């Protein structure tokens, strides 16, 4: 019986200690926020990136969809945000979500481009702790001049 207790202590207790320790290397969620100056619904050559936009990371329980974790970040001068996450969110759906734009004339979230899914677990075979979210965008109130030509060029490439 004593050998069983010693075996248990040697095998199970270290595993429990490792499981309760915080991660040594946090995840970094990185992405860009743009202004859709042509109101095209995607990035074009006329797209600009928004400094000072607010982005929120939300992680939801897979079964109940209740929010379990949130953290906000802001974009830098290049429209890039980086949010550090110290926990593993293996059993959760995590999305980067647009919160607000710093540009009043480009403040309406572009439909379908207002969130980006990110995987925040170390148990999926990805060696890096950096996670890159798809670019998210706000739409300009009115398209800037020259957009018709840009969209026409894109249509020509499509044919």
Image (spheres, rainbow, N blue to C red):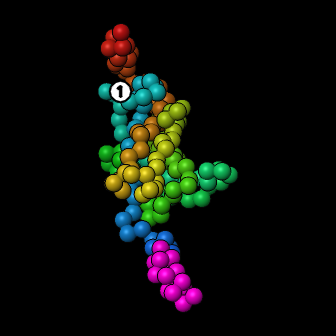
Residue receiving disc 1: 44
| Furthest-bottom residue in this view | 2
Q: Is 126 or 113 nearer to us in this picture?
A: 126
From this view, report whether residue 26 is shown above or below residue 31: below
Split into 4 quadrants, where in the image is the N terminus? bottom right
How dense is the environment of label 1, judged by Cα within 10 Å: few (below 14), some, or many (20 and up)? some
From this view, report whether residue 153 is shown above or below residue 102: above
Name the residue: 32% across, 14% down.
157
Name the residue: 51% across, 41% down.
115
Q: Main SS type for the magenta part?
A: helix
Q: Is 85 or 154 nearer to us in this picture?
A: 85
**Magenta stretch: residue 133 in it?**
no
Q: Which residues are magenta?
A: 1-15
Name the residue: 55% across, 49% down.
93
Q: Is residue 132 visible?
A: yes
* Callout count: 1
The secondary structure type at the circle numbered 1 is loop
Q: Is 64 or 149 nearer to us in this picture?
A: 64
**Magenta stretch: residue 11 in it?**
yes
Split into 4 quadrants, where in the image is the C terminus? top left
Name the residue: 51% across, 58% down.
89
**Residue 17: percent from left, percent from top:** 48, 77
From this view, report whether residue 112 is shown above or below residue 73: above
**Residue 103: percent from left, percent from top:** 44, 41
Q: Is residue 51 visible?
A: no
**Residue 99: percent from left, percent from top:** 52, 47
């Amino acid at each position: 019986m004593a050998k069983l207790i010693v075996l248990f202590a040697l095998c199970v207790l270290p595993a429990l200690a490792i499981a309760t320790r915080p991660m040594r290397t946090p995840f970094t969620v990185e992405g860009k926020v743009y202004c859709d100056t042509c109101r095209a619904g995607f990035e074009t050559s006329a797209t600009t990136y928004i400094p000072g936009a607010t982005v929120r990371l939300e992680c939801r329980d897979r079964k109940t969809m209740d929010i379990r974790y949130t953290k906000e970040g802001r974009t830098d001068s290049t429209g890039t945000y980086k949010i550090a996450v110290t926990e593993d969110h293996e059993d959760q759906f995590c999305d980067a979500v647009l919160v607000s734009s710093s540009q009043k004339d480009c403040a309406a979230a572009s439909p379908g481009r207002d969130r980006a899914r990110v995987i925040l677990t170390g148990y999926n075979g990805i060696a890096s702790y950096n996670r890159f979210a798809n670019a998210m965008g706000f739409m300009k109130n009115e398209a800037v001049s020259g957009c018709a030509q840009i969209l026409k060029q894109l249509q020509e490439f499509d044919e």
